[in-house]
């Protein structure tokens, strides 16, 4: 038995190390060629563009519920015109990147892990190795890069639709003054601190979720059960790690 | 091709073949405590079609994996095309695999690519041909396996036999020297079986390949192959032309070739393990 399997304590550490080695192998296999560009674009479409609808719907309702709660709380202090500031700050800094990453893990992370796991179960990965093609470069890398590109863009869409939801609710339903709403948002949100803080987070989360997805897919046992385990572990691990990394990054960015 | 078809084991075989392209010499392989191959020696003549046969689970596929360098033997050496496979680095091994085409069980086509892209993948990866040249070669290869007009289909809309033929086209697109087949006939209907069999023969002779087929289908092999190796209980128990093996006196060979239940090859798991362990000591 391998030494890492003996200790329940050491196993996660060993797994992290292997995941790191996988990342290095993947990044080391980058060659600037048309093939990589095309497959990354295709994957960005498959996992990014196809996640758009769910991200937009969720963003819209998160924006509405945020403004509902904020107006309700702020009204007690007669400060309901500050709603756009509260909604904007919490969205750009926290809720946008984190919620999009969690949704992305459920929607795209699982499909990446299941797809690679299934390729393994039907010996497509083995066939590739036998053709002297590196499956890490051919299969894992484009999906990882696509996740890295998609998540910041999806976060932007999430934020945009959340603001739209907030506008519809607070201006359309609660009758707030549109001029005050927009000017508060415009002057109160800082580009570097609020907006870019969220962008950095979404880039890190994008890398994290897609790395976990390709890694677990690639390590999956080539059976139906192995593929199932890989998808479950992808969602669980990426959700937990997104929240842990969120705290760590916030403590540095704030 | 070697004509001496008695049960001869390794030792005095080195001078017997004129031009072996694959030379497996006294190979021993085990997984945990289970012995999969015990002192197996096989030489495969260039240009021939050879079958490695034996009951399921006897280590036939292991031999293919040893030849392609996916597994390393615990003892012994494997020489493919003049190179010692087990001593190569990953890069050298990948280089060496360009001369080896492999057709895995069920074809293992890439399900996210069309038939055309499946066959074109090795060309795109290992050559710098222009798009027209790639297209020309792929279409010619698809035509040669009787599948002209299927290039835009996805693999899931192909029948089992068609998928196997696409996989054959993909395996030989780089004009390799050796093609390894893992159970190419399994799950096919009799017509598809004969078609695939005939294609294997035609491609082998037209391209001057050496084909190694792992199978337990005795009937199809009798028609197709030049030479057979039979494995049982981790050992090479016989070799020879299919006709000669049909009339072999060895009880184990007779049992396998004629599909008898009673005989030295046990179908019970514990007996099989015991006999493999006994043959070691």
Image (spheres, coloured by chain):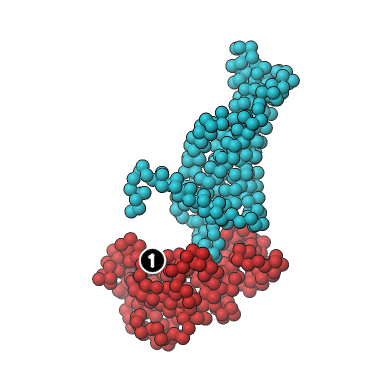
Q: Tell me, what hue is chain B?
A: red
Q: Tell me, what hue is chain A?
A: cyan
Mark 1 neighbour class, 10 Å CA radius: few under 14, some 14 to 19, many 20 or more: few
Placement of B45 over or under B169, stated as above or below = below
Name which residue lies at 44% across and 85% down: B17
Place of residue B27 in the rendered image (x, y in percent of width and height, measured from the top left): 37, 72
Name which residue lies at 33% across and 76% down: B252
Query: Can residue A83 be seen here?
Result: yes
Left or right: A226 in relation to A140? left
Placement of A27 over or under B120, stated as above or below = above
Query: Can residue A217 be seen here?
Result: no
The one nearer the camera, A127 or B19, is B19
- For the residue labelled by badge 1, is the local secondary structure a helix, a strand or a loop? loop
Place of residue B133 in the rendered image (x, y in percent of width and height, measured from the top left): 69, 69
Q: Quadrant of residue B150?
A: bottom right
Residue matched to label 1:
B57
Placement of A232 over or under A248, stated as above or below = below
Left or right: B192 in relation to B242? right
């Amino acid at each position: 038995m391998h030494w890492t399997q003996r200790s329940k304590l050491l196993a996660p550490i060993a797994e992290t190390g292997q995941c790191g080695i996988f990342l290095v192998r993947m990044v080391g296999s980058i060659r600037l060629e048309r093939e990589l560009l095309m497959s990354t674009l295709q994957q960005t479409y498959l996992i990014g563009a196809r996640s758009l609808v769910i991200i937009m719907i969720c963003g819209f309702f998160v924006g509405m519920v945020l403004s509902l709660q904020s107006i309700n709380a702020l009204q007690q202090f007669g400060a309901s015109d500050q709603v756009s500031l509260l909604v904007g700050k919490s969205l750009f800094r926290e809720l946008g990147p984190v919620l999009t990453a969690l949704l992305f893990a459920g929607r795209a992370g699982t499909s990446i892990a299941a797809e690679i796991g299934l390729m393994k179960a039907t010996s497509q990965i083995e066939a590739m190795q036998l053709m002297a093609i590196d499956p890490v470069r051919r299969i894992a890398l484009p999906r990882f890069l696509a996740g890295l590109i998609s998540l910041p863009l999806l976060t932007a869409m999430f934020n945009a639709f959340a603001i739209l939801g907030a506008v519809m609710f607070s201006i359309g339903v609660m009758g707030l003054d549109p001029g005050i709403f927009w000017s508060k948002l415009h002057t109160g949100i800082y580009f570097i601190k609020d907006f870019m803080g969220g962008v950095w987070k979404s880039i890190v989360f994008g890398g994290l979720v897609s790395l976990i997805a390709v890694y677990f897919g690639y390590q999956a046992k080539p059976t139906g059960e192995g593929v199932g385990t890989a998808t479950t572990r992808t969602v669980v691990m990426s959700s937990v790690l997104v929240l842990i990394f969120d705290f760590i990054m916030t403590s540095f960015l704030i | 091709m070697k004509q001496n078809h008695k049960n001869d084991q390794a030792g005095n075989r080195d001078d017997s073949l004129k031009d072996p392209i694959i030379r497996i010499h006294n190979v021993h392989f085990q997984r945990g405590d289970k012995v999969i191959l015990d002192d197996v020696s096989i030489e495969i003549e260039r240009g021939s079609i050879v079958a490695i046969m034996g009951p399921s689970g006897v280590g036939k596929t292991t031999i293919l994996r040893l030849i392609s360098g996916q597994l390393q033997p615990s003892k012994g050496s494997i020489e493919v095309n003049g190179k010692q496979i087990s001593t190569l680095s990953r890069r050298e091994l990948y280089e060496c695999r360009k001369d080896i085409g492999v057709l895995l069980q069920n074809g293992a086509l890439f399900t996210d690519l069309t038939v055309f892209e499946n066959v074109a993948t090795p060309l795109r990866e290992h050559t710098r041909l222009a798009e027209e040249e790639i297209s020309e070669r792929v279409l010619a290869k698809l035509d040669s396996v009787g599948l002209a007009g299927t290039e835009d289909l996805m693999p899931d809309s192909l029948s089992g036999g068609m998928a196997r033929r696409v996989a054959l086209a993909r395996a030989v697109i780089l004009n390799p020297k050796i093609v390894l087949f893992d159970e190419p006939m399994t799950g096919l209907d009799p017509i598809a079986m004969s078609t695939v069999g005939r294609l294997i023969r035609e491609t082998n002779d037209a391209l001057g390949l050496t084909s190694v087929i792992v199978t337990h289908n005795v009937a199809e092999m009798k028609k197709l192959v030049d030479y057979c190796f039979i494995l049982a209980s981790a050992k090479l128990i016989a070799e020879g032309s299919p006709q000669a093996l049909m009339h072999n006196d060895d009880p184990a060979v007779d049992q396998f070739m004629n599909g008898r239940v009673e005989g030295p090859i046990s179908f019970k798991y514990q007996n099989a393990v015991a006999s493999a362990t006994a043959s070691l000591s």
